[in-house]
Each structure stands twice: as structure tokens, then as C-alpha cells.
Image (cartoon, helix red, strand yellow):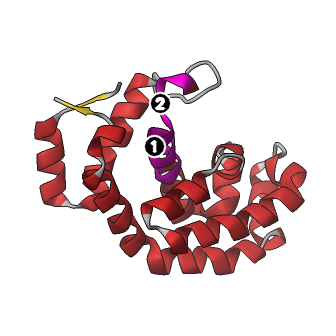
Amino acid sequence: MIKISNTNLQQAGAIGVNEFLQVFTDAYLEALGGNLNAENMHLLNGHQHTLLAFHFLREEVMYGGFVQLIQNGYGSYIFDNPTAKALKQMGASDLAKIIYKAKEIYDFNREELERETTEEEFTAMYVDFEQFDELEERFFEIEEEQTAIIARYVDDNIAEFGEIK
């Protein structure tokens, strides 16, 4: 089980929900040696994977959208796993809807979205995949509320996300 410092949680929680969740994901990434791969995936349970997937989703979409998320290699981690279903079970239904819709685009265009690209080709993908724009706009509208819902779920079910020490 991943150990989480209660002191760090208390300090981060006093700052905000993003910082509270970051304590968990930082601990997960540290346990994974900074890199999630097939050899170390077993170190996290399902709840921890969901929270880490949310972390990657939020970070990538906030700064570069779904195209960046996929190009940076997180597409299969988010869309080929029950991330949306798990987030819905946590209460983040609006976020789950966005992920389900993005998955449809991803599944239909997977080969093109995952291919190696030059900087110019990568930039052109934002035009080629404008269907993500509406989903990203909706994501920005609900991100703060959905993050708070997830943080509340984590706080209410903390033992599923780490061993507090």
C-alpha cells in the first residue's frame, strides 16, 4: 500500500482540493519511479489508478487538450480502462460524460492520434481534431466542481487511496 503523510495531507488540504489530490498522485508517481508502465502498474489498486488517470487527464487537457493527452501517451491509460465509469461512481458524472465522448473520437481515430508526429504535424492535429474543442470547453467549465467532488470522495474513502501515516 502507498503510504501518505497525514501532515502533508493536512497542509495541502488547507490550501485546496488540487493540492490535496496532488499529495496522493505525487506518492503514486514516487512509488512508480516517476513512470507508469506495464511492469509497475500492479503497485496501484483500482482507486489509485483512477486518481492517477484523473491527474494525467486534468494536467494534459488543461494545458494542451485531448490531442496533447493522447500524443503524450495517456490515451490508452484513460480510454482503454474503466476511468470514466470509476469517476462516475465517485460522483463526477459530468466528467465521465466528457471522457466517454472523447473516447468515441479516440477509438475512431486512434491510429492517427497516436502516430509519431513532427511539431508541425502535432500542431495541425488541433485543426484536424476540432471535435475535441467542445469537450475541452465543457471540461474547463466543470473542472473545478468535478475536482472538488473527486476530492470529497477520496477524503470519504481515504483508505482506498493510501495508508495514512
Going by the numbered disc 2, the residue's amino acid type is: Leu
Most common secondary structure along the magenta stretch: helix
**Residue 41 image offset from top left, x and y in percent:** 56, 27
Q: Badge 1: few (under 14), some or many (20 or more) residues near its Cα, within 10 Å? A: many
Say which quarter of the image contains residue 164.
top left
89 relative to 39, above or below = below
Q: Which mark is residue 74?
A: none
19 relative to 36, above or below = below
Please state the extent of the stretch shown in magenta in the rendering: 42-55
Q: What secondary structure is found at the residue carrying circle 2?
A: loop
CA gap, disc 1 to disc 2?
A: 8 Å
**Residue 91 image offset from top left, x and y in percent:** 44, 67
Going by the numbered disc 1, the residue's amino acid type is: His
Q: In screen coordinates, is 70 left or right of 154?
A: right
Q: Which residue is mark 1?
A: 47
Does the stretch in magenta take in 89?
A: no
Q: Which residue is mark 2?
A: 44
User: Is the C terminus in the top left, top right, bottom left or bottom right quadrant?
Assistant: top left
Query: How many dots with numbers?
Result: 2
